[in-house]
Image (cartoon, rainbow, N blue to C red):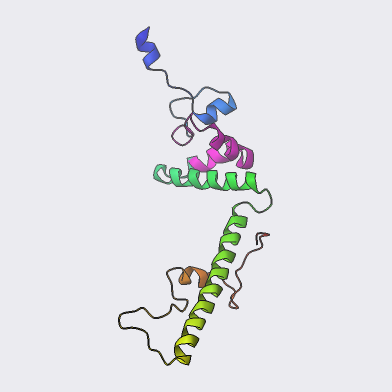
Amino acid sequence: MASSSSLYSPPCAACKFLRRKCMDGCVFAPHFPPEEPHKFANVHKIFGASNVAKLLNELLPHQRDDAVSSLAYEAEARVRDPVYGCVGAITFLQRQIERLQRELDAANDLIRFAMCNHGLEPPAGAPAPVVGGGPLSDIYNSNTNGGGAVQGTGSYN
């Protein structure tokens, strides 16, 4: 009797949610552990269990973890914000980058103005004022429409 109980493993969150027996080859089991029932509940609510199963079966096994992570993130974002989902969060962050870039540009202009008015040169070894060439500038510039405005239609300010 003790040996049969040691072979028991609890059903994955998907099978438990769907109230079915979790079989050995369950496509959900590696990605939806029983400790995370909310993860599958959100994914099921937004995408549907059948659609997720089809998607996972079409992917190579090494691609499934990333796909489930993406689905779970998108589902949680859609539950929080049914209209914009994760696009709302992305748009909010893009606008924040745009605002911070403008603040940085204004601070650099002020530094250059103050240095020119006082005839000062930057100290030896001091970095020159940053002029928009930071590590995020490539990302920022690829997400603009040429006029500096970030693309997207979110309601986040």
Taking the image as shown, residue 140 lies to the left or right of residue 125, namely right
Taking the image as shown, residue 30 lies to the left or right of residue 51, namely left
Magenta range is: 28-56
| Residue at the (37%, 16%) spot, across then down | 6
Residue 95 at what x, y percent from top left? Answer: 59, 65
Where residue 92 sits, quadrant-wise, is: bottom right
| Residue at the (45%, 91%) spot, across then down | 118
User: Which residue is outermost to the left?
Assistant: 125
Up the image or down, 60 lies above or below 121; here it is: above
Up the image or down, 15 lies above or below 131; here it is: above
Residue 30 counted in the magenta span: yes
Per the picture, the main secondary structure of the magenta-coloured stretch is helix
Up the image or down, 127 lies above or below 21; here it is: below
Taking the image as shown, residue 3 lies to the left or right of residue 43, namely left
Residue 20 at what x, y percent from top left? Answer: 56, 23
Residue 155 at what x, y percent from top left? Answer: 68, 59
